[in-house]
């Protein structure tokens, strides 16, 4: 079975390194001025150059987003950016605006162009239009079913890419104006406030000040907030439909999310073969450890059911928290950069292939001076013993309920 590319989000340099470490074939990233994830950490021009250099050092590809819907005031800056990218030479740029497409074709014909999902490609004629103009790849609309994708595949030769995991926008392929109306920040220029995730109530025109829940729930409703997309159990169906690249959403998410999702999809893709595909129940358990709104298969199998839109008030959920990052490993001892509190009695997990569902005790902690300590805090550098196989850049995580139980037990034991 043909294995598709695994394309991961890189909201900043740390996320780029994390995605590559855990098995991404390619990453997508951007300059905040021209990217639809303007609030991510993003990259300045020189960081973009370094990102391409870093990824190529590992044999990975870099796609740079220039996918805002620009206004006249943006054109001169974009022209300068095009000139800059002609020197950086990313593997592709991701565009949605026809004028910017023309600009790149004219000024940098050697750079491949991918058409963003913002272009709303929902039919074979649209796909053939972009292919005829010279697009290398099409990021298909999220509103397509697998059968519709198959029809596009039959009528085009261009590469096809779809999102397989991550947040789903309520608006058609992300073309949303709610944020502009309510917060004067346009989602189409990278400044979305996620207004669709807010909690709304109903007010009748002649009953000012009386707010009613849309459904029988005193907390209101998340009517416009979809569950997150997760296609990990159905990847072969997308391969059979002709998809060349599996894309993970999440440039705004943290490294805990990037590491866990990329690692899990890497394992799933690598398990595909001519002998069939058997989803591992552990994959969904793994994906539940990272920030999500619950999961849906979106519209790949037809209309998304209403139950995949309405929430009970808990918009995000996760079972595990990031503890730290392994910076060095030497003779069974790891130098760790902490991102959370760590106690000598903690039980942790290493996000390392082969260590899934295994817990390890923190026997002792040493500080940067080599002194034994009982606990350490976020941003501290510590040394701990680690099992054989733990690698530099691996993440360490902990079940949030373990921490809650530890705090509760301490509180109870100190109660008179």
Image (tube, rainbow, N blue to C red):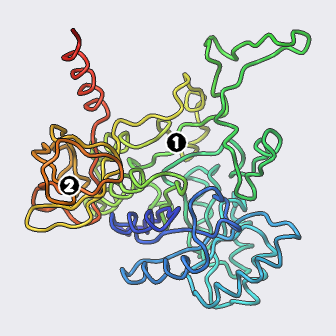
- Which of the 4 image quadrants contains residue 107? bottom right
Is residue 398 in view from this perspective?
A: yes
User: How busy is the neighbourhood of tag 1: few (under 14 within 10 Å), some, or many (20 plus)?
Assistant: many
User: Does residue 328 appear left or right of residue 217 in this picture?
Assistant: left
Identify the image quadrant of the C terminus: top left
- Relative to 156, residue 298 above or below: above
| Circle 2 residue | 367
User: Of residues 88 and 274, which is closer to you in this image?
Assistant: 88
Q: Earlier along the polypeptide chain: callout 2 or callout 1?
A: 1
The residue singled out by tag 1 in the image is 228
The image position of residue 48, as x and y in percent, is 56, 77
- Residue 236 visible in rendering: no
Residue farthest toward the right in the current orientation of the protein: 206
Residue at screen point 30% across, 42% down: 341
Mark number displayed over residue 42: none
Discs 2/1, front = 2
C-alpha separation, residue under disc 2 versus residue under disc 1: 40 Å
Instruction: Examine the image and state in which quarter residue 109 appears.
Output: bottom right
Residue toward you, 229 or 390: 390
Q: Position of residue 356 (x, y in %)?
A: 21, 48
| Left or right: 266 in relation to 303 | left
Question: For the point 69% across and 82% down, which residue is it?
Answer: 134
Circle 1 sits in a helix, a strand or a loop, which is it?
strand
In this rendered view, identify the residue nearer to me: 81 or 93. Answer: 81
Question: Viewer-proximal residue, 35 or 393?
Answer: 393
Which image quarter: residue 318? top left
Q: Position of residue 8 (x, y in %)?
A: 47, 63
């Amino acid at each position: 079975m043909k294995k598709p590319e695994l394309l991961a989000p890189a909201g900043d340099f740390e996320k780029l390194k994390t995605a590559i470490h855990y098995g991404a074939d390619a990453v997508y990233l951007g300059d905040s001025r021209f990217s639809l994830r303007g609030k991510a950490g993003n990259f300045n021009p020189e960081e973009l150059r370094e990102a391409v250099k870093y990824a190529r050092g590992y044999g990975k590809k870099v796609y740079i987003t220039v996918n805002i819907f620009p206004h006249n005031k943006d054109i001169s800056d974009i022209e300068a950016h095009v000139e800059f990218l002609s020197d950086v030479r990313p593997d592709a740029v991701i565009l949605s605006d026809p004028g910017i497409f023309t600009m790149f074709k004219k000024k940098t014909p050697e750079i491949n162009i991918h058409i963003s999902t913002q272009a709303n490609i929902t039919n074979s004629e649209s796909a053939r239009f972009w292919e005829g103009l010279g697009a290398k790849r099409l990021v298909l609309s999220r509103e397509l079913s697998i059968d519709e994708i198959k029809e596009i595949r039959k009528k085009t030769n261009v590469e096809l890419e779809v999102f397989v995991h991550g947040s789903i926008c309520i608006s058609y392929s992300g073309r949303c104006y709610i944020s502009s109306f309510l917060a004067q920040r346009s989602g189409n220029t990278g400044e979305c406030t996620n207004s669709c995730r807010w909690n709304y109530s109903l007010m009748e025109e002649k009953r000012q000040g009386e707010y009613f829940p849309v459904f029988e729930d005193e907390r209101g409703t998340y009517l416009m907030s979809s569950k997150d997309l997760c296609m990990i159990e159905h990847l072969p169906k997308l391969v059979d439909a002709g998809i060349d690249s599996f894309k993970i959403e999440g440039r705004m998410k943290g490294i805990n999310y990037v590491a866990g999702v990329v690692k899990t999809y890497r394992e799933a893709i690598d398990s595909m073969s001519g002998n069939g595909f058997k989803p591992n129940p552990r994959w969904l358990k793994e994906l539940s450890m990272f920030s999500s709104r619950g999961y849906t298969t979106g519209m790949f199998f037809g209309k998304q059911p209403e139950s995949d839109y309405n929430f009970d008030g808990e918009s995000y959920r996760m079972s595990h928290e990031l503890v730290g990052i392994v910076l060095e490993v030497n003779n069974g001892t790891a130098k760790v950069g902490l991102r959370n509190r760590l106690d000598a009695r903690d039980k942790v997990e290493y996000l390392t292939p082969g260590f899934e569902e295994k817990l390890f005790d923190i026997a002792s902690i040493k500080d940067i001076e080599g002194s034994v300590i009982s606990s350490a805090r976020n941003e501290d550098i510590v040394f701990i013993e680690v099992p054989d196989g733990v690698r530099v850049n691996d993440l360490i995580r902990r079940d949030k309920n373990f921490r809650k139980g530890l705090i509760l037990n301490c509180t109870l034991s100190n109660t008179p």
